[in-house]
Amino acid sequence: AQKVTQAQTEISVVEKEDVTLDCVYETRDTTYYLFWYKQPPSGELVFLIRRNSFDEQNEISGRYSWNFQKSTSSFNFTITASQVVDSAVYFCALAFYGNKLVFGAGTILRVKS
Amino acid sequence: DADVTQTPRNRITKTGKRIMLECSQTKGHDRMYWYRQDPGLGLQLIYYSFDVKDINKGEISDGYSVSRQAQAKFSLSLESAIPNQTALYFCATSDSGTSGIGEQFFGPGTRLTVL
């Protein structure tokens, strides 16, 4: 069975703090993709990153970075020097053959000024 | 113009009413999906379609039906709406991608309230 677990329901930080959002996934497939989406208060889903199962390189994009570790089935997301505009719900998702997406329950991030 | 559009964006209706949510895309993708979002549950797949003649049930299809009128249009119907169908509904599209997995592009969402 495919499953994504985001154990952190809600995280609160003060602006400029670094914050890591955890994502653990389960799948028996050898080929799959992992995603992170941001959902700001306005409600739309904003695509952040896609990573395939054969590429374990970490990625950095500005203040965002992602750590993919197949050995622990984790795909964690770190925001460096958080800002109030980072406040949102963040979803980790798993896509496997047949292209169905399985989402985690999401982590609410609150960044206070 | 947005690649994936949903109408209406907001809808309030009463228990027992029939509701249709519409999704259109200009990305030329074959695959389309309907998801439902409830607080604390992430998004759950309701139905998906890999082409006009292919319709498949997702995790939570009970109480819903769909129609794929054309490659670019995929509608979700609630035949007799009930309050626990109050949720945010998302449409998405994708191509087949590599290894059968393509990136999904989401519409802006429809907020449905059933009283």
Image (cartoon, grey):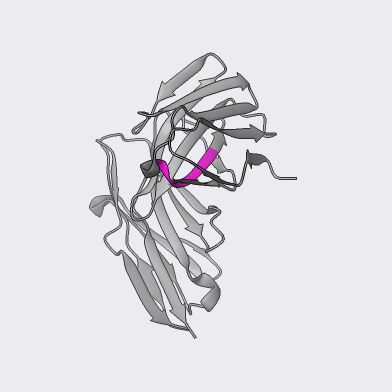
Count up the numbered dots: 0
From the viewer's side, name the closer residue of A24 and B69.
B69
Q: Quadrant of residue B83?
A: top left
Q: Position of residue B67 (x, y in %)?
A: 54, 21
Query: Dominant secondary structure of the magenta stretch?
Result: strand
Q: Position of residue B96 (x, y in %)?
A: 53, 28
Horizontally, residue B1 falls left or right of residue A106, namely right
Residue A5 magenta: no
Relative height, residue B73 to residue A68 (above, below): above
Q: Quadrant of residue B23?
A: top right
Q: Position of residue B53 (x, y in %)?
A: 53, 13
From the viewer's side, name the closer residue of A90 and B46.
B46
Single out the residue that lies furthest toward the right: B1
Single out the residue that lies furthest toward the top: B53
In the rendered image, which quarter contains the N terminus of chain B? top right
Report the span colored magenta.
B85-91
Q: Position of residue A113 (x, y in %)?
A: 49, 86
Q: Residue, x 54% and y 38% (percent of image)?
A: B91
Q: Residue, x 37% and y 57% (percent of image)?
A: A106
Relative height, residue A86 to residue B21 (above, below): below
Q: Residue, x 47% and y 33% (percent of image)?
A: B101
Residue B90 magenta: yes
Q: Is residue B79 visible?
A: yes
Q: Residue, x 46% and y 75% (percent of image)?
A: A80
Horizontally, residue B57 falls left or right of residue A4, namely right
Q: Is residue A100 visible?
A: no
